[in-house]
Image (spheres, rainbow, N blue to C red):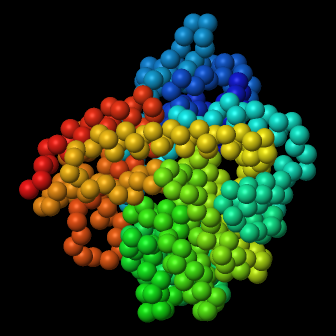
Amino acid sequence: MSEPWSIAGVDLHLDLGTGGRRAGLTDALREAVRAGRLAPGTRLPASRTLAADLGLSRGTVTAAYGQLAAEGYLLARPGAGTVVAPRATAARRPVPLDRPWRPVVRYDLRPGLPDLSAFPRRDWLASARTALTAVDHAALGWGDPRGHADLRAELAGYLGRVRGVRTEPDAVMVCAGFAHGLALVCAVLRDRGVRAIALEDPYLPPYREVAEAAGLRTVPVPVDADGIRVDRLAAADVGAVVATPAHQFPLGVALAPARRVQLADWARRTGGLLVEDDYDGEYRYDREPLGALQGLAPASTVYLGTASKTLAPGLRLGWLAAPPELVAPLVRQRRHTDRHTGILEQLTFAELIRSGRYDRHVRRSRITYRRRRDELVAALPTGLPVTGIAAGLHLLVGLPAGVSESAVVNAARRRSLGLEGLSAHYGRSGRRPPQLVIGYGTPPDHAFRPALRALVDLLHEYPGR
């Protein structure tokens, strides 16, 4: 006999089996506890209530509770009822992953995250309150796969004002971050007959993973001090290019003006698509703001941005601005996957932009991260080359000749210091000078200087050879 019950806030499906009712109830409750469906501390219904719910006698329920209490699965507390005992649940084996996600360390100087303690909670709460008060009931239903019209309008205005993006709200799509936007674009490219896509080399590993998951072949194209080598694209035989013109990750260079023109010309001449990742475009310190590449070739460029660095990646808020002829194919792809981004997050972000709170937060963050960058550069041992410091939330530190990147990264891990080596980001093999990619965005303010001391102490153990 299978019976669901919902008493005192607890929902559970019990299969009482075909044997005796007392034994069936005892076995069903025991299995629910061991499987974790009844968590430690969960309060069970009173015996009289559960008996009425299941059509059993109260004595049957009392006997089952008593048996499980004797076995250590339940605790009967006078005046507090019957609860699941601590640690009564069977230990669960962790599900194995092919790659653990960002192991926790005490001092985190890996790139890729902002200071999450600086998330503007008060501003977000105020914006959420305004948005939730004003939202129409109909907006809580199934929405436009491109995103809510209010946020698309705010993004189109913001991107035009701050990044020089030439777009309209109808050509903007709200997505769940850069990787999600790239996955949608790659799927559309595949359906349009594109077979290969070029990636800057070095690059973020998710670029390759996302593109190849969509069925595209990835072609690494080298990057030098002026950005991606556009002259290598002809031999690459690709239908699209992923580029980071504002701040290349991980080298930190900006795409030179001449290269920008060459890349836009390549797209117009070949019909290829430029996929612009505006990586860390909001954070620049020692140079004039660089407008988006999309402004040079709006008909050939899909521009992608995200709030992962300015706010937090956990919000899962990103956006893309596409050429008009790609909007409908992107909508079809979106409709077949997750439909659209959460409406309350969208409306809250729209209000954050509309109110000016987002601009003020970005300006405050820029000041904080510039100060951190300056402290990091000043603290590093003399003689180590430092590059990529003009923008972003990371920089490169060269290691002495003969020192192994992996040896330094592993030594750091043993001290609970998170570091990354540059070589892990290359798609092509070859000998390169050893370098570390040092992120200065992640630690909260109180932990930043201790993290610097841990880094400097480690680097002093590897003097030049």
**Left or right relative to 359: residue 67:** left
Work out whether residue 373 or residue 4 is closer to the camera in this orientation and state it: 373
- Residue 185 in sight: yes
User: The N terminus is located in which quarter?
Assistant: top right
State the quadrant of the C terminus.
bottom left
Residue 249's spot in the image, x, y percent? 44, 62
Farthest residue to the left: give it. Answer: 465
Position in image of residue 224 (x %, y %): 38, 73
Residue 178: percent from the left, percent from the top? 58, 62
Q: Is residue 284 left or right of residue 321?
A: left
Of all residues, the one furthest to the top in this rendering is: 78
Q: Residue at x 39, y 34 (%)?
A: 448
**Residue at the (56%, 57%) spot, across then down:** 288
In the image shown, does 16 or 178 lie closer to the viewer?
178
Taking 407 as reference, is 455 above or below it?
above
Residue 415 location, quadrant: top left
